[in-house]
């Protein structure tokens, strides 16, 4: 079988420099110089089909790139998380709580539109308290006061108070 001379042909980063004999599979083997300077012997089939395009440095670099990309993603994620910190409170966790309509305190929720804390207390279908506050603490205090005034101290301790929620 006539051998195709691949000398001086270029395959990716590899330049064929010399014939290096026949492999066990009968294929011609070619000595190649990689752009990085390393010399390798590659099977002609792998060269012509484009399976081998470097001494192996290409794959190593790609692997490194993937790792660097991951590093960047992790750093960006941390940056975004920091941006979402408002007064030491994670906006992300506020949003999560908001999704379940809970601020952690019954009757107090965060209104993303007005960026204020809303305290509500509903008794027999009527809001006895429905007011927004700049801080979470104020909203909680207002809610607690409203509960005490309207339902008394004993009721304020009861878990089933949530039943009054609108
Ligand atoms: Zn190389």
Image (cartoon, grey):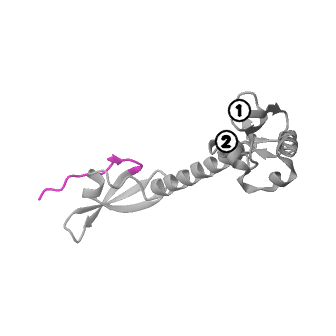
On whether ligand 1 comes within 8 Å of the CB at mark 1, the answer is no
In this view, the residue in front, 52 or 41, is: 52
Residue hosting label 1: 112
Q: In this view, does 141 lie to the left or right of 80?
A: right
On whether ligand 1 comes within 8 Å of the CB at mark 2, the answer is no
Residue range corresponding to the magenta coloring: 1-14
Number of numbered labels in the structure image: 2
In magenta segment, residue 12: yes
Q: Are marks 1 and 2 in contact (CB under 8 Å)?
A: yes
Q: In this view, does 165 lie to the left or right of 88?
A: left
Question: Could you say where residue 84 lies in the image, as x and y percent from the top left?
Answer: 73, 41
Q: How crowded is mark 2: few (under 14 residues within 10 Å), some or many (20 or more)?
A: some
Residue hosting label 2: 98
In this view, the residue in front, 37 or 118, is: 118
Q: Which mark is residue 164?
A: none
Residue at the image point whose x is 53% and y is 52% from the top? 66
Q: Earlier in the sequence, mark 1 or mark 2?
A: 2
């Amino acid at each position: 079988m006539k051998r195709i001379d691949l000398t001086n042909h270029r395959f990716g980063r590899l330049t064929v420099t010399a014939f290096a004999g026949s492999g066990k599979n009968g294929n011609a083997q070619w000595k190649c110089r990689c752009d990085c300077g390393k010399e390798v012997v590659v099977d002609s089939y792998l060269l012509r089909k484009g399976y081998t395009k470097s001494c192996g440095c290409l794959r190593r670099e790609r692997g490194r790139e993937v790792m660097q990309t991951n590093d960047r993603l992790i750093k960006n994620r941390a940056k975004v998380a920091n941006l979402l910190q408002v007064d030491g409170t994670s906006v992300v966790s506020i949003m999560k709580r908001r999704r379940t309509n809970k601020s952690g305190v019954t009757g107090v929720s965060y209104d993303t539109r007005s960026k204020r804390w809303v305290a509500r207390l509903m008794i027999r279908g009527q809001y006895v308290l429905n007011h927004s506050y700049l801080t979470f603490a104020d909203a909680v205090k207002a809610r607690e006061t409203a509960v005490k005034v309207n339902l008394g101290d004993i009721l304020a301790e009861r878990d089933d108070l949530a039943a009054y929620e609108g």
